[in-house]
Amino acid sequence: MLTLDTTKARPFLQADWNELKSEAAVAEKLLNDRTGIGNDFLGWIDLPENYDKEEYVRIKAAAERIREDSDILVVVGIGGSYLGARAVIEALRPSLAAPNDGWPIIYFAGNQISSTYMRNLLKALDGKRFSINVISKSGTTTEPAIAFRVLKKKLEETVGKKEAARRIYATTDKARGALKKLAEKEGYECFVVPDDIGGRYSVLTAVGLLPIAAAGIDIDVLMRGAADMRRRNLENPGKNMSVEYAALRNGLLRQGKLVEILANYEPGLHYVSEWWKQLYGESEGKDGKGIFPASVDLTTDLHSMGQFIQDGNRILMETVIRVAHSAEPVLLEAEEEDLDGLNYLAGRDMDFVNENAMRGTQLAHLDGGVPVSVVSLETLDAYSLGELIYFFEYACGVSGYILGVNPFDQPGVESYKKNMFALLGKPGYEAAGEALRKRL
């Protein structure tokens, strides 16, 4: 069961803790009553219980077909269309794992515009059986649209147009958009990006569930973890862990802690941090407000970012994701000649060392003026990740309402797109393009 420990952060608060929690409870009520701004994007709140059961069955069936006919699944999407799935997959199917479990390897594309990456991906697909899951609400987002064009051509050249259509799965709008139109024309199987759930909250929809299931991960267990966290939150309004986390981080923000670092001690959690950064950055970073979300992989980054965290500008708060128990401990043995001085650890496992590195780091950061909170997972499995996803999503909604922003829109994302279209020469952007080129 997921737990939250804020005892090493609350002493830094200058505001009254009970008042902060009361304020967070008011924000939570806005969320649950659906009366806050952006309330047309709250479908994720009940999602672990209230989801399309028929589509869920189709997701599992599609995953089995992909398993049978493909060595590789290429997931094409950007932002919320891939980060949640990648977070779960890379946490539970480490990159070092040999592809001998009968499930396809998952590659990701359309999350950048690198020709080098695409060329290497195309080479990796040579001689391999592969399928594509293209994920886009509109079908016109530049990065995934470019990648899909290239990969679709590769698949059609490899297996023919008819078989390619059977191996392409489109996750898109239920009724409209360029991708939906193409899918209907070509006969791709379609899954739905819900109208009332934004991309960064969509990991427990078909957006995330199809790639996760195709990776061989039990989505029933993932959903059960999320459903249990939802139940715990709703049964304890104003007193649950998500509210506590939202209250704490906003209290620390008000006294100058402008940056929150999410730290983990398991390499598999790297993309959980990437998903978390989008969730909070896109939800809170607007109207000149917000906490800047950053992340570190520890102990690795103690040898690069450790100096700043310990001794730099005191604008930091830290949240640690701790995994209490490892499924596969590695025992350390004594050596006849103790040249590295590590024989004192003989008989211990690496998790013991990692846990105490974490504890020592927390105390050092506290001494350096960094408030530290700890989110503990019992083990790194699908159930715990389901809990973690819902814990952070719910807290994000509450935290955004405390800040006084709409946590469910992202108006600033469009600015770079307009400039890019103008510089690329997209029809209708000619005047803007000329003005921008003069500035450059």
Image (spheres, helix red, strand yellow):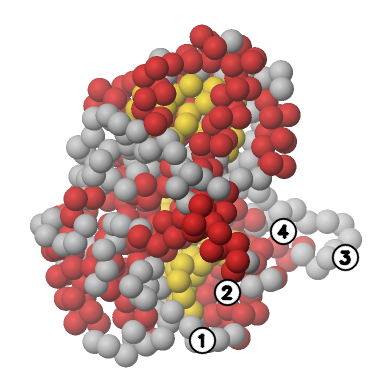
* Mark earlier in primary sequence (3, 1): 1
Residue under the image location 64 percent in, 54 percent down: 349
Task: Find disc 2 in the rendering and name its residue.
Answer: 361
Q: Are marks 4 and 2 in contact (CB under 8 Å)?
A: no
Q: CA distance from mark 4 to mark 3?
A: 14 Å
Q: Dot 1, crowdedness within 10 Å: few (<14), some or many (≥20)?
A: some
Q: CA distance from mark 1 to mark 4?
A: 39 Å
* Mark earlier in primary sequence (1, 2): 1
- Name the front one of labels 4 and 3: 3
Q: Amino acid at mark 3?
A: Leu
Q: Amino acid at mark 1?
A: Arg
Q: Are marks 4 and 3 in contact (CB under 8 Å)?
A: no
Q: Is residue 234 left or right of residue 246?
A: left
Task: Find disc 1 in the rendering and name its residue.
Answer: 314
Residue under the image location 59 percent in, 69 percent down: 439
- Name the front one of labels 3 and 2: 2
Residue 131, given in percent of the width and then of the height, sits at: 54, 22
Task: Find disc 4 in the rendering and name its residue.
Answer: 346
Q: Dot 2, crowdedness within 10 Å: few (<14), some or many (≥20)?
A: some
Residue 328, given in percent of the width and then of the height, sits at: 58, 44
Q: Nearer the viewer, residue 193 or 96?
A: 193
* Mark earlier in primary sequence (1, 4): 1
- Residue 310 image-quadrant placement: bottom right
Q: CA distance from mark 3 to mark 2?
A: 26 Å
Task: Find disc 3 in the rendering and name its residue.
Answer: 339
- Can you say whether 127 is above or below 257 in the image? above
Residue under the image location 42 percent in, 35 percent down: 139
At numbered mark 2, what does the secondary structure look like: helix, strand or loop?
helix
Residue under the image location 35 percent in, 33 percent down: 177
Q: Amino acid at mark 2?
A: Thr
